[in-house]
Amino acid sequence: MANGNAKKNTTADIGFEQQIWAAADILRGNMDAAEYKHVVLGLIFLKYISDKFEERYQELLAEDDDVEDKDAYVEMNVFFVPPEARWSVIATAAHTEEIGTVIDDAMRAIEKENKRLKDILPKTYARTELDKRRLGNVVDLFTNIQMIEHGTDKDILGRTYEYCLSRFAEQEGKRAGEFYTPSCVVRTLVEVLQPFQGRVYDPCCGSGGMFVQSTNFVKNHAGNIGNLSVYGQDDNPTTRKMALMNLAIRGIEADLGGNNADTFRNDLHKTLKADFILANPPFNLKEWNDGSLNDDPRWKYGLPPSSNANFAWLQHMIHHLAPNGKIGMVLANGSMSSNQSGEGEIRKKIIEADLVDCMVAMPGQLFYSTQIPVCLWFLARDKENTGFRDRRGETLFIDARKMGTLIDRVHRELTDEDIRRIADTYHAWRGKAAAGGYEDVPGFCKSATLEDIRHHGHVLTPGRYVGAEEIEDDGEPFEEKMARLTATLREQTEQAEKLDQMIWANLEVIGYGG
């Protein structure tokens, strides 16, 4: 476990959300984590919108207004909950055999009244595999919790949703990559890009974490999330529903297209030019192109190999970038140096087009879904007109591999301080006065020229550029240090010889010394 100081800056330091997880865990029984996820998240969502509805209901009652006027709720960005779907009905049925059917009917009724939620909510609570006694116990748990009253930011449900996603990711292991990117990775992307306003796009949006952290960034800096327009899509229909629920409880309206779809074969936002693109595409995706995409206009810098989609994702995002747009994306480390199947030539062309703004090598053990080491690519369409320092012909390299804190034996998180150091280094390099002045730090960061990158064969691995960390001078004169080290070496060599003699002597005693 991490030390106490570091722990405060990671998701290990969680109170209410952890209590919800532990209590709701009684429902699971022998259910697979992938199924259990939708049961718990659906109940959390249902309870939250019920609480928000009840809060608005009481306001209207106090004002002697029509409590059944649907528009009175919609205008306050509150979902209208019809009478048969209200939590009081569900709570009353908690310990009946019909509880599963009551919840399913409530989900259908809510979808019918709220078009934004159509076909999104889970309706599988009546199935026989779900223990109704345990389900009733979880309903009791939620009945005793007023979710809107916990926390001053009134986003406790959002935080609980995110926390449960992370715990499900931990339990599902490799399959978790389909829906979850560790929040510290997403926050690093967001803190570097700073998406205050404009169009935000994620072509493989999973459960919507990139959008959530983008809007959180705006809120934390006293901005208006209404200044962000959110676009995305995902190939997995179940994951897409999770994203829509995740965004709905935060009041984020997003265009995720009318259905799930493969981004390469069915781009749902063909004409979009985004100001900010944030993404964590599937690592090293194979067989993404059967040949039908060979002549696609997105491959401006070369046809990516069908054996690996890394540079297909990268070029897809460049294709959707606005004239002053920026990209922040997660890729496997191989993308920085691979020369297989033409990848090196594609990377070279992207570099020579002066699109690569910053490269960050990340520490290992960040992901629940894979042990593949990852890096962050930051690209900018226009390095000159950013309102700050002209960085044409330059790229910032950051080696963050030594950062992070272990939160358990196998998983690591970047702390708030780690994220701030990476983001501040980038913003200082960009010339933002608030971030201070920029200087290369041996072993951590280096501002390299295009000529430097050419010298390294267009390889973008930060370790090649930042050099070795400076070792603090201990003040011991060189001659004295050499004399001391030589004496120590001589002493250790003599001890080794004595040990060898003892070992051979013992071997001879038992007949193996000859």
Image: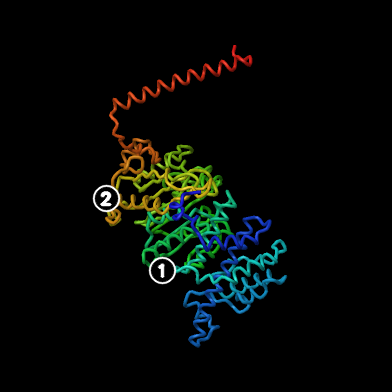
Label 1, secondary structure: give it.
Answer: helix
Res. 437 mark: 2
Mark 2 and 1 residues: CB-CB less than 8 Å, in contact? no
Res. 33 mark: none
Its colouring scheme is rainbow
Q: Identity of the amino acid at label 1?
A: Gly
Q: CA distance from mark 2 to mark 1?
A: 33 Å
Camera-side residue: 436 or 22? 22
Label 2, secondary structure: give it.
Answer: loop
Residue 260 coordinates in the image, percent (x, y): 56, 59
Residue at (52, 16) in percent of width and height: 501
Q: Identity of the amino acid at label 2?
A: Gly
Please tell me whether residue 419 is drawn above or below residue 55 in the rendered image.
above
Image quarter for residue 446? top left
Residue 326 coordinates in the image, percent (x, y): 38, 54
Residue 406 coordinates in the image, percent (x, y): 49, 47
Camera-side residue: 473 or 126? 473
Image quarter for residue 129? bottom right
- Residue 417 visible: yes
- For discs 2 and 1, the disc positioned in front in the rendered view: 2
As drawn, the residue found furthest toward the bottom would be 64
Residue at (53, 62) in percent of width and height: 17
Q: Is residue 5 left or right of residue 97?
A: left
Residue at (45, 68) in percent of width and height: 153
Quadrant into which the C terminus falls: top right
Residue wearing tag 1: 226
For marks 2 and 1, the one nearer the N-term is 1
Crowdedness near tag 2: few (<14), some (14–19) or many (≥20) residues, C-alpha within 10 Å:
some
